[in-house]
Amino acid sequence: MKDFRLDLSDELSALTPPPLGDVVTEATRKGRRARRVRTVGQVAGSALAMAAVVALAGSQLHGTGTGGGTGLVGPAAGGAPAPVASAGPSSTPSPTPSGALVRVSGTAVLATVLDSLPAGLETSGYAANNATEAHGKYAADVPVAQVNVKTPAGLGMMRVFVGSASPDAKCTTFDGCRRDKYGQQVRVTHIDDNCIQNTVVTVRHADGTAVTVQMATCLAREGRTNPPGVLPLTEEAAAELAGNPAFHNMMTPAQGAAADARFPSLPQFD
Amino acid sequence: MRKEAEFTAFAEAGAVRLRQIAYLMCRDWHLAQDLTQTTLTKMYLAWPRITRRDLDPFGYARKVLLNSLLDHKRLRSTGEVAIDRVPDLIPDTVQEGVSADTRLTLIDALALLTARDRAIVLLRYWEDHTIEATAEMVGVSNSVVKTQSMRALATLRAHLGEDRADLFAS
């Protein structure tokens, strides 16, 4: 393909593009401003979250895990049963008197993941945050939760992203897409040379919520390496998890506060 | 301040190439310029993380750029539509005196592909990435990259004619 590159190079050289201008200075200026806005937002968000936690302290909260902790999950372990079997894919959280819907948080995603996993699974290594482009396409600013799952073969790590599906995503077998029992689009992708995204299962819900389960063949980075791991779930189980209608890209502030109280000191990862 | 100086050095060195990739994708210098600036702004915000994790900054920037481009096309309801010929360059009737130089260029032919196929072809054969890296950047599976790149090359071959088939010799 050398000729392809050479010809394209020649054609580009023959063009007369407009001057590049001061694109670097402008990008730096906008970046500084965005960083300032983000910092102010984080401070305000932290204050709100603290207020919510204080207001809810002492209220009855269910849950199995603690921040960065371990636990058994699912109904058998005392967590709220996930409505996998009973609910259809149309249940959407409704705004309550406590406030309008807000973007779901990583912590709330973690709570839903743990409540949705098959009962009795031993989990650990909880973490959550809002993702960046580094987590993959469509992952920008998508909340994500990280969970380690103990399997007979060893420890496995997965990350679950909850965002919005591309509105014009088509579903064809050619694209590796199938439909689950709810008629939701399920895509499975394998990236053999990327241990974090070794097997990626995405389910597009009827309400436009997209849930992506990234199953790793390694564990989260420790220092400069990722310790070896095993796939935490089968592809079918991951599709079942991602297809759970309990996942939504929006939540009520009360749901967010409850999740924050359930995991008060959750570590972040990058 | 050292990190900001590093970012500035990277941005100044990479801006032209980023705009070139953007142009090849959209064939609009102004849009290419906007997307380059958006990409560099995002790079500025991500720069501490990129350096902390020893990521390849240009690879990261290229990924941000392609995502922005594909998202831009997805969001535009009146976006570019792939067509099967370029009227300006493929006259319906043979004209006397038209030189061979009016033949379809590679850039014209690339414009006939869909945005995703164009990204796959450019990443594979212009940027020389592996199938796996291309799949990861475009957000599709390896098999999609393989099949779509073969189809896209066949489309290019069909438009460019047999006399330029050597362009695609491996």
Image: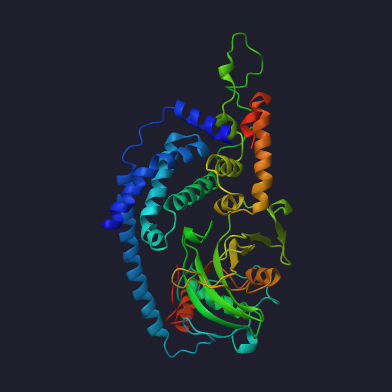
Answer left or right for A157 relative to A256. right
Q: Furthest residue to the top?
A: B96
- Which residue is at the front of the view, B131 or A103? B131
Residue B18 location, quadrant: top left
Q: Is residue A170 something that shows in the picture?
A: no
Where residue A180 appears, as percent x and y from the top left, is 72, 65
Residue at left offset 53%, top offset 59%:
A136
Relative to B108, does residue A92 appear above or below in the rendering? Answer: below
Question: If the image is split into quadrants, where does the C terminus of chain A sit?
Answer: bottom left
Residue A253 can be seen in this image: yes
Q: Quadrant of residue B49?
A: bottom left
Left or right relative to A190: residue A20: left
Task: Indicate left or right for B5 with A246 as reference.
Answer: left
A260 vs A26, nearest the viewer? A26
In the rendered view of the protein, which quadrant contains the N terminus of chain A? top right
Where A26 sits versus A243, above or below? above
Return the residue nearer the eye: B3 or A128.
B3
Q: Is residue B91 above or below residue B135?
A: above
Coordinates of residue B11 in the picture (x, y in percent): 36, 47
Q: How is the image coloured?
A: rainbow
The count of marks equals 0
Coordinates of residue A167 in the picture (x, y in percent): 59, 53
Q: Residue at x 39, y 44 (%)?
A: B14
Q: Quadrant of residue A82?
A: bottom right
Q: Report the residue that reaches farthest toward the left.
A: B1
Q: Residue at x 59, y 62 (%)?
A: A210
Q: Position of residue A17 (x, y in %)?
A: 41, 30
